[in-house]
Image: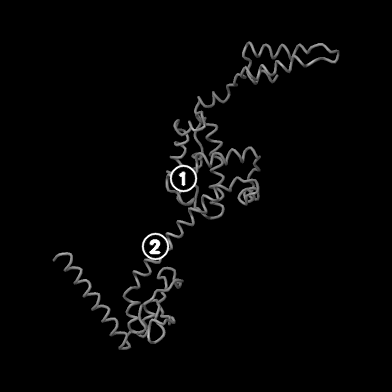
Amino acid sequence: MNEQNLSSVMQQLNKLLLTANTLMCESGLMEDAGRKYGFYLLRVESERFKSGFYYAVKYKDPETRKWIPSKKSTGTDDESLAKAFAIENRDSIIHEYKERKERRREKNDDKSFYKMLGEYYQGDSKYLKDDSANGARVLTADQRQKYNGFLASYLIPYLRAKDVKSARDITRSVYSEFKTHLQNEAVSGRTGKRLTTYTINTLLSGFVRILKYHKRKGLIQQLPFGAKEAQIKKTKEDRAKRRKPGILPDRYLGGILGFALLDVNPDGSPDMLSFLLSAIGLTCGLRNIEMSF
């Protein structure tokens, strides 16, 4: 049997089924069809029909047991035919409604989620106020600016590339891959320098804060990381680099030397201590921690 013949047979079967349902409705066997099949008919005024109306059908969601808000035209003013249409098309219409609802939900989630990310670290955001009310530390303007830059440069592009539409889509693997993503030299190179482990962990703390807000509000069931997985584990090399004080650049030391030459004692003589410290620092490479003493 070719495809055309099969299609013709299916059309005939559908007509027979519709006729059978119609006969059952006309005979009174389907008087309780609405209660049994979860639908009811609406009379809608229309000039298309001689009767001045047609029937539309509304369905009850079999899972939630609530009436679906939208209605569907049966295309007839005959009550028996309308009931037959409602029974025949019930499953496909409910399925179509749920698919539309899910697409709308995903679209709204996407829009609201990224809007929230853009607003989270604004000075007067409701999110930071909620954080503070729940014991989170208050952030300075510089810290908020740093987190905003992190969101715009790293987090948001990454989440969009992963097709993340809401916090529910941030799984353990997505979070873990993001940590690796931040350590990638090509990614970190956008800023002109490689991100250190300490810098990455500082930025991740801003992401964790957002995820904790979602969990507190019941928007996600659990955080996408374990107790010791939120940040990157620091190695011995990372800790050694952190303890090692940096050498002050010449341009800074030159400025200090210039100020030292202007610094004088009460009697008008130059302050030799300031002069010598800056001169030694400029020639010998004193470190910032040494210059502070």
Describe the element under mark 1 as helix, strand or loop. helix
Regarding mark 2 in the picture, which secondary structure is present there? helix
User: Foreground residue, 28 or 123?
Assistant: 123
Q: Position of residue 148 (x, y in %)?
A: 57, 41
Q: Which residue occupies the foreground of this view, 70 or 59?
A: 70
Residue occupying image coordinates x 43% and y 40%? 177
- Residue at which label 2 appears: 99
Viewer-proximal residue among 220 and 122: 122
Is 51 on the left-hand or right-hand side of 231?
left
Residue 267 shown left or right of residue 246 in the figure: right
Amino acid of disc 1: Leu
Looking at the picture, tell me which residue is in the foreground, 38 or 262. 262
x then y, percent, for residue 178:
46, 40
Q: Quadrant of the C terminus?
A: top right
The N terminus, quarter of image: bottom left
Of the residues under marks 1 and 2, which one precedes in the sequence?
Answer: 2
Disc 1 designates what residue? 159
Q: Which mark is residue 293?
A: none
- Residue 111 against residue 3 in the figure, above or below: above
Amino acid on which the number 2 mark rests in the picture: Glu
Q: Residue at x 71, y 11 (%)?
A: 276
Q: CA distance from mark 1 to mark 2?
A: 24 Å
Residue furthest to the right = 267
Where 72 falls versus 143 (above or below)? below
Above-or-below relation of 245 to 48: above
